[in-house]
Amino acid sequence: MGLFSFLKNSGAKILTKKNAKTVADNPEIKRMEEEILNKQKEILLRGIVEGMGKKKVTNMSLSFDGSTATIHGQVNSQADREKIILALGNVAGVAAVDDRLSVKKEAPENEFYTVKRGDSLSKIAKRFYGDPMKYKKIFEANKPMLKDPNLIYAGQVLRIPNAGRKK
């Protein structure tokens, strides 16, 4: 065993830019590159879920096909389930979340709301609860995704807790 030295510019001329382009244009290579890229994105999405604090999902499996994140496993509460869906769905490049999570303690689902241009948590709270000061309820329901109640953006999807909603 050891390191063997060779003359870099002699030998078969197959490692050229032209040959590399020919290989890169091969559909099988493109499929493999897409598969690797999706695997990298899957790892990043898994990190988001795992970074949400205490073990949120048991027996988690997560896959990504280029636009849809599919998550399997079990969570303790409906709130955990919804927060995980939102954390994954509010990532650029994720068009859909295929939720295959089971919940230990069943509870009614909360509504999801897509933030529109000009929205604020207080405007959203006024719409759903009739009181703009209840923005804190929405903020708390969307932690850790939201870190500051003043930092929301158009297109972001938020959880709106049912408790205290106006009829």
Image (spheres, rainbow, N blue to C red):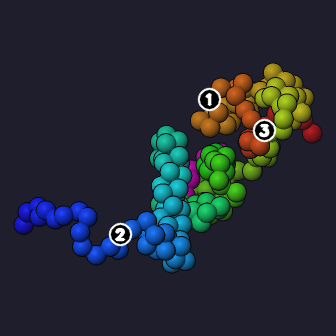
Sequence order check, earlier mark of 1 and 3:
1
The percent coordinates of residue 142 (x first, y second) are: 67, 37
**In the orientation shown, which residue stands out farthest toward the top?**
133
Specify few, some or many for label 3: CA neighbours under 10 Å numbering under 14, 14-19, or 20 or more.
Answer: few
Q: Which residue is mark 1?
A: 147
Whether the magenta-drawn stretch holds residue 75 is answered as: yes
Specify few, some or many for label 1: CA neighbours under 10 Å numbering under 14, 14-19, or 20 or more.
Answer: few
Q: Amino acid at mark 2?
A: Leu
Whether the magenta-drawn stretch holds residue 22 is answered as: no
The percent coordinates of residue 91 (x first, y second) are: 63, 47
Q: Nearer the viewer, residue 116 or 167?
A: 116
Q: Nearer the viewer, residue 136 or 87?
A: 87
Image height check: is 61 above or below 50? Answer: below
Real-space Cα distance between discs 1 and 3?
A: 16 Å
Real-space Cα distance between discs 3 and 2?
A: 47 Å
Image height check: is 58 above or below 87? Answer: below
Q: Amino acid at mark 1?
A: Lys
Residue 50 appears in view: yes
Q: Is residue 67 left or right of residue 44?
A: right
- The answer to which image quadrant residue 113 occupies is top right
Q: Residue at x 35, y 69 (%)?
A: 15
Q: Is residue 103 left or right of residue 61?
A: right
Q: Are marks 1 and 3 in contact (CB under 8 Å)?
A: no
- The answer to which image quadrant residue 104 occupies is bottom right
Q: Which residue is mark 3?
A: 154
Q: Which mark is residue 15?
A: 2
